[in-house]
Amino acid sequence: MVEIENIIFDFGGVIINISHQMVENAFKAMGVGNFEALFNQASQSKLFIQFEKGEITAAQFRNRIRELTSLEITDEKLDESWNQIILDYPPERIALINDIKQNYRLFLFSNTNIIHYDFYIPKFEREFGYSFESLFEKTYWSFKYEERKPDLFSYNQLLAESSLIPAETLFIDDSIQNILAAQEVGLNTVHITNEVDITDIFQDGKFNQAFLFKQSKSLD
């Protein structure tokens, strides 16, 4: 049986709820009628990857969005719309993390950007009264880390920096491409879906290892 000593959490869709539909609605309300085409174009130009790896600034990101939309959108309005993806922190998930940190070394690895970070970090502190990052031994935010999932190097560097043994480490994420990459470097994984919440995979402050075997069969 695998002995889990360390847990690496994803953030969006795992700890905090997110909604891609809310972002789409917000941009359409600003007059971006071709939202899907805009973000496909931005993806093809690697804009989001650059932003999430800290290769461009928030100002450069905003200017590029204005170029793509041909709209004069203020920084404030653009940030407000961009942050519509961020929903709520379910208190039961935060309570769970506080509970299990007594039994495991906890880490966070998130593909994210400075605009979102500057919104959801103060939001947590307002709602819970303490620092979000205090929940973890170390946090790896892609725009600070300058590495991004699912690049294999990003996982291997994280493991080396924090002295983690892959076979003793659990990686939890809601994106299947990130799960499959984590498995390539030897991590144990749980894929969070609409049917599986992090509160489902722990019992009495311990990881329920049945999820490893259940999901390994479904991913074969």
Image (cartoon, rainbow, N blue to C red):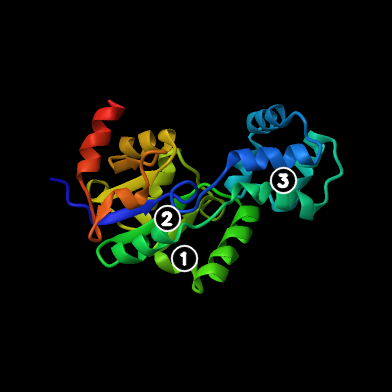
Specify the amino acid type for callout 1.
Glu
Image vertical order of residue 176 relative to residue 135, above or below = above
Q: In the rendering, at what x and y percent does residue 199 appear?
A: 34, 52
Query: As drawn, which residue projects farthest toward the left?
Result: 1
Q: Are marks 1 and 2 in contact (CB under 8 Å)?
A: yes
Q: Are marks 3 and 1 in contact (CB under 8 Å)?
A: no
Q: In the rendering, at what x and y percent does residue 194 appear?
A: 42, 38
Image vertical order of residue 89 relative to residue 41, above or below = below
Dividing the image into 4 quarters, which one contains the C terminus? top left
For image coordinates 24% across by 64% down, the residue present is 103
Q: Which residue is the site of mark 2?
A: 108
Secondary structure state at the residue bearing disc 3:
helix
Viewer-nearest of discs 3 and 1:
1
Secondary structure state at the residue bearing disc 2:
strand
For image coordinates 49% across by 53% down, the residue present is 16
Which of marks 1 and 3 precedes in the sequence?
3
Q: Which residue is the site of mark 3?
A: 61
Q: In the rendering, at what x and y percent does residue 195 appear?
A: 37, 38
Specify the amino acid type for callout 3.
Phe
Q: As drawn, is 32 to the left or to the right of 2? A: right
Q: CA distance from mark 3 to mark 2?
A: 24 Å
Q: As drawn, is 39 to the left or to the right of 128? A: right
Q: CA distance from mark 1 to mark 2?
A: 9 Å
Which of marks 2 and 3 precedes in the sequence?
3
Residue 133: mark: 1
Secondary structure state at the residue bearing disc 1:
helix
For image coordinates 54% across by 68% down, the residue present is 127
For image coordinates 62% across by 55% down, the residue present is 114
Looking at the rendering, which quadrant does residue 218 occupy?
A: top left
